[in-house]
Amino acid sequence: MTTVIRTEDVWKTYNLGSPRHVDAVKGASIEIPKGVITGIGGPSGSGKTTLLSLIGLLTKPSKGKVFIENKELSALSEVFRTKFRRERIGFIFQAQYLIPQLTATENVAIPKLCTDTSRGEAERLAREKLSSLGLGHRLDFRVAELSGGEQ
């Protein structure tokens, strides 16, 4: 099976002023096969969110490497990582960062609008994605009208 995400001995250290530091992720090496639903578990404070931030290219590792589709991306510039993330990675944060004035469709369409996708096509894709998740009956509801789970 093809590996889509791989990390090699990834560390993330936060310096709190010499000599204090916190190793949020310590030597994580993982492989995630394409098409396989994968979970990351552990107690509170164990580095799960930090590891996801590393895999999602939101932050650079202090050491080690992150590969996506066999390309080492973690050492590349912020500009390149932002472009790659915008075009290729979907990320759902612990807290929802939805725009309350917009509908579910408009919120989901936003990432596509940051590319060369037209508004009509972005909204069509958003409606398709929301429908595939069982939210076809909520396409034109504003954030406040959605349940926490629907958000």
Image (cartoon, rainbow, N blue to C red):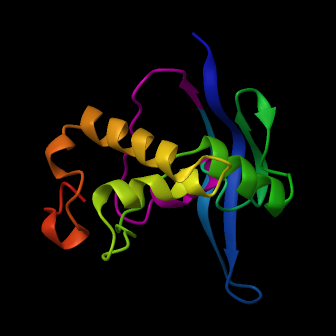
Q: Nearer the viewer, residue 144 or 96?
A: 144
Q: Nearer the viewer, residue 27 or 109?
A: 109
Identify whether 70 is placed above or below 125: above
Identify whether 19 is placed above or below 100: below
Q: Is residue 51 magenta?
A: yes
* Image point (14%, 68%), residue name: 145
Residue 129, quarter of the rendered image: top left
Residue 148: where, in percent of width, then height? Answer: 17, 63
Q: Which segment did they paint magenta? A: 31-55
Identify whether 150 is placed above or below 13: above
Q: Is residue 51 left or right of residue 63?
A: left
* Image point (16%, 62%), residue name: 146
* Image point (68%, 84%), residue name: 20
Which quadrant: the N terminus?
Answer: top right
Residue 108: where, in percent of width, then height? Answer: 40, 54
Q: Is residue 65 left or right of residue 142?
A: right
* Image point (13%, 62%), residue name: 147
Number of on-image labels: 0
